[in-house]
Each structure stands twice: as C-alpha cells, then as structure tokens.
Image: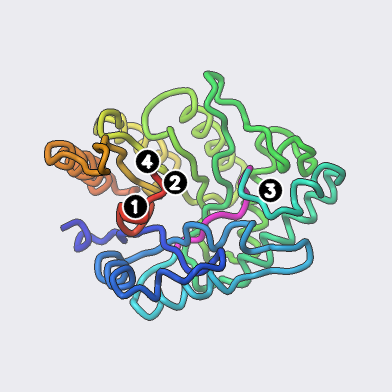
Amino acid sequence: AAAPQGIPIGAAASADEYGETSPLLNPSYANLLSSQYSMLEPGNAMKWDVTQPTQTTYNFEPGDELVAFAQANQMRVRGHNLCWYTQFPSWLQPYAATATPAQMATLLQNHINAEVTHFAGQVFAWDVVNEAFDDSSAAALRDSIWYNQPGIGQTGTGYIAQAFQWAHAADPSALLFYNDYNIEEPGPKFDAVLSMVQDFVNNGVPINGVGFEMHVLSTYYPSATQLAQNMQALAALGLQVHITEMDVRLPVDASGNASAADLQTQAQVYQTIMTVCLQQPNCTAFQVWGVSYNDSWIP
C-alpha cells in the first residue's frame, strides 16, 4: 500500500558472504525479496569483515552478487557500512593495537575509497558511519579504533566528518547517511546526533541524511508525535531520513509462536511508523532488517 506513494521499500539481504549457500539460490527467499521489496541493503556483505579479509586484499563478490540481483529485479541498493566500531576481520584489531593514528587514517581512507569506488553508480546511498554514540545518559562518542583507540588523528566527531568527506570524494553522486539506533524519539542520543549533523551542515561536510534503525518492541516504540518531531528537526537542516533496519520484537511461546493478538500489535507498530514516514516529506525510504522474520537476527 505504501509503495505507490513513491518511497522505496527495502530489506536487509544476504548472499554467500560467510561461505554458506547463498539465500538468493532459495526460490522462496529470492521471490519474496524481489516481489515484495524495491530496495535491498546487504546485511553483512559490505562490512569490513567480509570486504577486507586481509590488510592488502578486498572481497566484493558477495556485494556484487546482491547488486546484480537488485539490478535484475529493478531494485535500488543501499550500502552498509563503511565505518563501525565492531564486526572487524581478524587482523584489524591487532593491527590497531600498535598502529599510529596516521596509519589508521590511511587504512580507513583506503578502505572507503576502494569500496565506494567499486560500487559507484550502483549504490545510491551509504551508511557511512554506524552507531558512533554510546547509550549513556551523556550520549558520548563510543570508544573505537577509529575514534580514540588509537583513532585517526581527529578530535571529537572529526573522524566521522572525515569519513564522509572521503566517501563523497569516492562517489560524489551517492547519498551519505549517519546511521544509529535509539534516536527515533527525543532524548540525549538524538540531541547528540542532531548537534553533530547541524555542525556538519554548517561546515560543509557532505551529509545527506540520518538513518533511524528502528529496532523496537511491540511493547515499546516511539509515538507518532515523537518520531515526527525528530524527523522535522532533521528536515529543518535539509536532511533526509531513512528508516533503515526496522523490526519489532514480540513475545513467543515455547514453540516459537506468537499469539494472534501480539501479531496484530506488531502489524500496528509497523503501520504507525510507516504512516509517520509517509507524512514527512524528508522520510524517503523504509527498510526492514531481514527479508522475513524467518531469517531475522532476533533470537
């Protein structure tokens, strides 16, 4: 029902990024993905642990497989992600333990340039930096090898701004997003993100939007008013919003089955969030995390 209103409806998808049989070879999975969605995002195939298995080698084949599937089925592709505090290849953390900030800067720049250049013209939007703020009441920047352990030689949010600049240089036509969770309603974490992106806009950092992950519960999710308020605050800065990773956890019985009432509640949560998105001109994509709950990351 939402798709004709002009926003892509997406899903996180998998190929054979960890050596398993590609789900794309499963007709049920492939048919559901291609018929019910107009956008896909590699759940893991474009992350560091897949794309740079050694310091000197890149592996873009799983990402290429998903891009080819998307192109064959007239789907858009979102890229995810270029800079995150976790899900590293086995060599990266030991390297960071002895590397200088200058070496880390070169490493990150080379990675962003290689990946974004490889997928240039095929990926319309990137989650450039993912989950940089912690969940404390202060919503401080999260410790990471890119920020302060040892970092890339930038203070504060400077490493995030630098990542955006490198990504933009590699593909000036791609939309660039900051992506995080628990920023869908007012609070310290959203305030921290808003302050950062306002600074970026004011200083010419090439940022186009913010991704709201939207991992929520059937018993706790942002109200329509709260969500609209946050989207409007970003719209005032000229920034888009994508719902990037939505799923709705709900209780199940010992056999793994949910009650009919809880499934109806879950559907209503999706409807509430989708309705807000369709009402806000700067909400320009809606994506769920997984093709179906059969392949969800939720336990």
Real-space CA distance between mark 4 and mark 2, rounded to the nearest whole angstrom: 9 Å
Residue underneath mark 1: 288
Residue underneath mark 3: 162
- Name the N-terminal-most of marks 1 and 4: 4
Element under disc 3: helix
Q: Identify residue type, mark 2.
A: Gly
**Residue 95: where, in percent of width, then height?**
81, 49
What's drawn in magenta, residue-wise? 78-85
Q: Are marks 1 and 3 in contact (CB under 8 Å)?
A: no
Q: Which quadrant of the figure contains the N terminus?
A: bottom left
Q: Identify residue type, mark 4.
A: Met
Real-space CA distance between mark 3 and mark 2, rounded to the nearest whole angstrom: 18 Å
Mark 1 Cα shell of 10 Å, populated few (<14), some (14-19), many (≥20)? many
Front one among 36 and 222: 36
- Name the N-terminal-most of marks 1 and 3: 3
Q: Identify residue type, mark 1.
A: Val
Q: Does residue 81 show up magenta in the picture?
A: yes
